[in-house]
Structure formats: C-alpha cells, structure tokens
RNA sequence: GCGCUCGUAGCUCAAUGGAUAGAGCACUUGACUACGGAUCAAGCGGUUGGGAGUUCGACUCUCUCCGAGCGCGCCA
C-alpha cells in the first residue's frame, strides 16, 4: 500500500519531482552545484564506477565543504581522510578553488578563487534569468488553490492557500513548467437550494444589489435563517436542489447569478492582492458534476466498490476508524448523491486525462490530510495516478492570533479577507506617513499598497507552511527584522544609490565585477546561490525557503553597503560595486516577485 | 482509543544526516556632519519536550513516553 507519509515514498517524490524540477549542469551558476558536478566522476571512480554523492554543502569554515568522503569510506572501507586526499589530489577542483583543506575526520573545505566567483557572477549579471536555467524537463502541473465558496465571503482561512498557491505558480512558471491554475470554488451542493430560494424570495434585483455590496455572508445567513425558520422554505430548498442537479434551465440561470456575483467579489480580492487568478482559472465543483457517475462506473468496473450501510464506498488499505475497522471512502451516498470524495476523484481523472497533468498540487489545509491520502490511494488503486504521475497535498497549518488561538474578528467569526487587507493598508499608511510625509498622493497610495499587502504576504510565506503561524500586525509591518517592509526598503535603498548618482542601472549591467573585500565576496556567493534557492523551495513546495534566501541576500547587501563605499570609490571599483548593487536589486526584486511581493524603487 | 501534524533562546521563527544548532524581536552596550539612521556592529540568551535506539556523525531517521492541535461513514 503506498503510504504517502513513509520515507520511501517521500524519497521517491524527491527524486522524480525534485530531479525533474532541479537542474544542475553547465548552465547552473551556483558554485556549490558546479563543484558537485566536477566531483561526480571522481567519486564514481573511487566508488568502483558506481555514482556516489559528493555531498557538497555551504560551509561556515570555507565557501563550501565536501562531506562525501565519510560515507564513501564507510561503504568501500578505508580511511576517510585518504579519500579526501584523493579528492584533493585529483585536481578537478583546482580550476575553481584557491584553497583546499582537509579537516576533521575527512571534510574537504573549499575556498573558491576570486576569478571563478567573478566569472560566474559576470555570467549571471548578463543573464536576464539571473542564472536560473529553464527546466529541460517541463512538466504539466495543475495547482489547486484558493477555492473560496460561492455566496460566502473570503476569510482569513483562504489566506494561506491563496498566497502559497500563487507563489508556487510563479516559481513553477518561471522554471519553465506548464502550469494550470485551478480555483476549485465551492459552487455546488445542497446549500444552493436554500441560497437560490432566498434569491427568489428577495427578488433578483434586490439580491444582486445586496450581493454586489460584497456582503455575501449576510446573504448566506439570511438564507440559513429562512431555512431554519420555515418548513415550507425547506421543502422548496430541497426541491430546488433536485432542479439544479436535474439541469432545470431557470434554476441554472439563478445559480449562475449567484456564482457570477460571488466571483466578482473573489476577483476584487485577487486584484487587491495581486494574485494571478482570473475567471479563466475557475474550475468549481460544478465543473466536475458530469464526471461523477463515471467515477462510480469506473470504480465498479474495477471491482473496487463495496456497499456499506447503503452507500457505495471504497476501502483503501491501511485506513481504520475509531473502532479499528477499515475506514471507507464514501463515493456515493446512501441516498444516491455524490460528495467531496467523488468530486476529488473526478478531478484526478480530469486533470490527468484531459489536461495531461504530470503533477497535481493541492494547496489545502493540513486538516484534510487523511481525506487526500485516501483519495490519492484510491486513485492509485484505480490506476489513474500511476507513477511517475503524482498528486501532492501541499498542506498548511492554521492562522493563529497573538493569543495562539485561531484568528477571529471581534465578532468571533473568521476575519474577513477584505477587512484584513483594509487593516493592512491602514497600518501601512500610518507607518508611511510617519516615515515619509513628503510623498505625492500617487506615490503615497502606491507605496501604502505595496508595503501593506507585501507585509501580509511575506509574513504568511516566510514560515514553514505545515506549522500553524501567528498573525501579528506589529511584527509583520515592522521595518526591522525579517519582514516584507525591510526587504522592500533594502531594495529601495539600492535604487537610491543610482538615483543619487544619476546613473542608469542598465548601464552597469554585465560590466566586470571585482571581488575584493569579504563583504563583496559574501554578497557575490549569495547571488550565485539564487538558482539553488529556487530549486530547494520547489522540491518541498515551501516558499519560506525562498523568503529565507531573500532575507539573507538583503542582510549580505547591508553588510556590503556598510563596509564598501560605492559612489565614493575610485574606478574601476566604483563601477564594479554599482554592478554588484544592480545585480543585488534585480535578484531581490525577482525573488520578491516570485513570492508575489512588489519591490518599490522608493518608499 | 486509533491516525496525522507539531514541540528548537523570554517571544516569533530557521537549519537538503555533517564539524561549534542559526536569525529576527525584546533587552544591554557601542557607532551618528548619515552613498536613505526606515541603519549597522557587539553582547546576553539553548541539556533542540523527556528517554532509548540506528549511524563515523542525529534538531533531522526509528521506537517509546509527555504535551498541543486536527481528523476518525454518507458536510464540503
């Protein structure tokens, strides 16, 4: 039974997806990857022709350390220091290293030669892609994210899925994959009987007016209240569900009205956020309704279906309920209806067979892990998800308030998305007005938007997605520390150097960069690590890794900025440092953009 | 009860099985005629929840216990 949580399965994923998405090779600028490639044949030779990982890592004792001698010594027998010596003696690193040192039990500490660093950097500086190669193995990736409900307002619960999904989309696309965004909105199910009847009672015009105000929750609650208060209404609502599922034209039209008014609200939020989701990406649950009977039919033909308490279910092995009995995945309810599981299976079929998906990502909260494990297992049993094709639940934790309880508004409900963003803008405005009261009205508005939204996004993305995270206004909007505003400020500061000197940034692009001081060297090495940062982020679908990179890049820059005068330096140092500053700003802005965050040139 | 996820500095978080576990905030101290001080530097702070195991090497993998959160048949 393929259990997605086992180590073996995870390593399979790391290899198949990771290797496809990762791409080392001659175009890779990261020196770590370069020496790893250089060492590969040496390690293979030492290992009797079989490849062995040199395990090259960044080091705090040198620029890089080669750890591979230790496990290799274990495997083939012998002294790890002798193997390290053989690695050094092979001479393959001589072209890139100015110093090689064997240390401890058998580590090889590598110091890159300044020429090597400068050459790599020149290549990157002249490259629009900043050294990040397009993948040679483009995949079709379907990303299922955001997924708000029709006739319900987006709230804080949609924050993480929307932002993580958007960031992954941007990175995957940049990497050269074919990315299909799917916004699996909740636009189907029994609540729609009630909602449509309420729409009818209210009258279309009044309902439309009501909904277009953005008060979707109010509408939903009224419908719910009517449903709870009147048996007559309940009967109509149930009948309406039947009509909806039966394809009744008038009912469909009314349903479409609800969907349209809701998606208008969603789009307002997406635009405000700068998230790449449009009506073209809508793939609501209704989309998959026609496929539902086929899901059942196929499962039946495969003899996977069992009847249990009147429902049609599949028993994927390895899942048990509270009594220790096999846990079923219900695909057709006793009354004949379909449910969430059916629709997710339909999605798998559609995404694999119609869209040709190699990889399906579900950016959905961690609470649904068991559901997805079961769905994926059943899809594998049915042969719809045969390797190397795969589905991954990109799970994330809950958003907590500073009291460590689920974040709620004062009224006790999940905080509405729009309220949250409004507050972000208000708080950003206070900060901006205090720091820089001289901005023009246009600049002010634009800056507030970039800072406020960027702060929320960065706070959201910069911690490990699988953990719950604490939502703290004061921290995320601080200009100090690992925050969005700090990074944006770092970018603005670099731009300011060029403004002050009245130099076009593009004019220094690709000019030679001289590596002299430790700060220049540190910054240069960081810049060269950008492709690897993106790779490691995508291997685990963890945007916080790119956040960490961008933050470290910013701190490396400030160290450089403190120690290395740019404009006051003599030529050719001055131009070199300008080029280094420009490349830093480009990388910073690019990394932030992959996270969906704007990088203002001044603020 | 079973399953999953999590537990790292006072707080918020990092750390692809590698050497001495790193940042930020807070706190203490220092740098100010400043290429944007919306800054920088230094210090303080840890038996990585406890215990056992695997390994040359464990925050990381395995087991167990403790604690927190979530899930466990017809909601989505």
Image (cartoon, coloured by chain):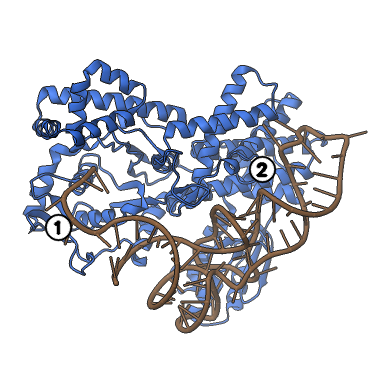
Chain colours: A blue, B brown
Residue indicated by mark 1: A314
| Residue A105 higher or lower than A479, as above or below | below
Residue A514 lies in what quarter of the image?
top right
At x 54% / y 28%, what residue is drawn?
A449
Q: CA distance from mark 1 to mark 2?
A: 53 Å
Please give left or right for residue A140 compared with residue A242 in the image. Answer: right
**Position of A525 compared to A545: left or right?**
right
Q: Position of residue A207 (x, y in %)?
A: 26, 20
Q: Is residue A594 visible?
A: yes
Q: Residue furthest front?
A: A229
Answer with left or right where residue B20 lies relative to residue A131. right
Disc 2 designates what residue?
Answer: A480
Number of marks drawn: 2
Residue appearing at x 53%, y 65% in the figure: A55
Residue at the image position 34 percent from the left and 66 percent from the top: A6
Q: Position of residue B75 (x, y in %)?
A: 21, 45
Q: Secondary structure at mark 1?
A: strand
Residue B67 in the image: state x and y as whole percent: 45, 67
Q: Position of residue A269 (x, y in %)?
A: 41, 29
The chain letter under disc 1 is A
Please tell me whether mark 2 sits on a helix, a strand or a loop: loop
> Is B9 rendered above or below residue A462?
below
What is the quadrant of the N terminus of chain A in the image?
bottom left
Circle 2 chain = A
Can the viewer see residue A583?
no
Q: Residue sitting at 56 percent across and 29 percent down? A: A426
The tag earlier along the polypeptide, 1 or 2, is 1
Label 2 CA crowd tier, 10 Å (few <14, some 14–19, many 20+) = few
């Amino acid at each position: 039974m393929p259990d997605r949580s086992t180590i073996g399965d995870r390593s399979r994923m790391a290899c198949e997806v990771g290797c496809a998405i990762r791409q080392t090779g001659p175009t890779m600028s990261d020196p770590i990857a370069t020496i790893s490639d250089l060492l590969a044949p040496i390690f293979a030779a030492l290992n009797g022709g079989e490849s062995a990982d040199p395990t090259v890592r960044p080091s705090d004792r040198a620029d890089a350390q080669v750890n591979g001698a230790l496990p290799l010594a274990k495997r083939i027998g012998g002294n790890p220091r002798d193997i390290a010596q053989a690695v050094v003696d092979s001479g393959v690193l001589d072209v890139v290293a100015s110093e090689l040192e064997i240390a401890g039990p058998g580590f090889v500490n590598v110091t890159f030669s300044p020429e090597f660093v400068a050459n790599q950097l020149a290549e990157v500086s002249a490259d629009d892609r900043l050294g990040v190669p397009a993948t040679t193995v483009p995949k079709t990736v379907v990303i299922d994210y955001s997924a708000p409900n029709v006739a319900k307002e987006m709230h804080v619960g949609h924050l993480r899925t929307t932002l993580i999904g958007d960031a992954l989309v941007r990175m995957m696309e940049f990497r050269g994959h074919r990315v299909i965004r799917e916004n699996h909105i909740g636009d189907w199910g029994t609540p729609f009987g009630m909602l449509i009847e309420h729409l009818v009672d209210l009258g279309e015009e009044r309902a439309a007016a009501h909904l277009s105000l953005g008060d979707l929750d109010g509408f939903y609650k009224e419908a719910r209240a009517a449903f709870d208060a009147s048996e007559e209404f309940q009967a109509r609502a149930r009948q309406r569900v039947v009509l909806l599922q039966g394809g009744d034209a008038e009912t469909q039209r009314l349903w479409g009205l609800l969907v349209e008014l809701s998606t208008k609200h969603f789009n307002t939020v997406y635009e405000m956020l700068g998230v790449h989701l449009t009506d073209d990406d809508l793939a609501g649950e209704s989309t998959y309704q026609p496929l539902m009977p086929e899901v059942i039919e196929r499962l039946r033909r495969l003899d996977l279906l069992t009847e249990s308490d009147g429902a049609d279910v599949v028993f994927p092995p390895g899942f048990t309920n509270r009594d220790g009995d096999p846990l079923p995945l219900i695909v057709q309810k006793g009354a004949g209806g379909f449910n969430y599981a059916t629709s997710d299976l339909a999605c798998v079929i559609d995404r694999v067979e119609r869209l040709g998906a190699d990889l399906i990502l579900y950016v959905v909260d961690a609470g649904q892990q068991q559901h997805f494990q079961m769905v994926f297992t059943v899809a594998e049993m049915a042969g719809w998800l045969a390797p190397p094709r795969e589905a991954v639940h990109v799970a994330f934790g809950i958003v907590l308030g500073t009291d460590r309880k689920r974040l709620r508004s004062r009224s006790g409900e999940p905080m509405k998305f729009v309220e949250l963003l409004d507050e972000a803008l208000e708080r950003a405005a206070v900060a901006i007005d205090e720091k820089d009261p001289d901005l023009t009205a246009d600049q002010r508005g634009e800056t507030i938007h970039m800072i406020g939204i960027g702060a929320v996004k960065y706070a959201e993305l910069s911690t490990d997605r699988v953990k719950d995270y604490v939502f703290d206004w004061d921290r995320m909007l601080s200009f100090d520390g690992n925050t969005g505003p700090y990074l944006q400020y770092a970018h603005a500061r670099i731009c300011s150097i060029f403004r002050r000197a009245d130099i076009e940034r593009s004019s220094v692009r690709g000019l030679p960069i001289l590596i002299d001081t430790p700060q220049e060297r540190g910054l240069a090495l960081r810049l060269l690590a950008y492709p690897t940062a993106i790779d490691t982020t995508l291997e685990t679908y963890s945007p916080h890794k790119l956040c960490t990179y961008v933050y470290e890049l910013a701190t490396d820059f400030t160290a450089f900025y403190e120690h290395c005068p740019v404009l006051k330096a003599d030529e050719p140092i001055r131009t070199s440092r300008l080029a280094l500053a420009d490349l830093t700003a480009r990388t910073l802005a690019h990394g932030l953009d992959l996270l969906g965050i704007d990088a203002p040139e001044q603020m």
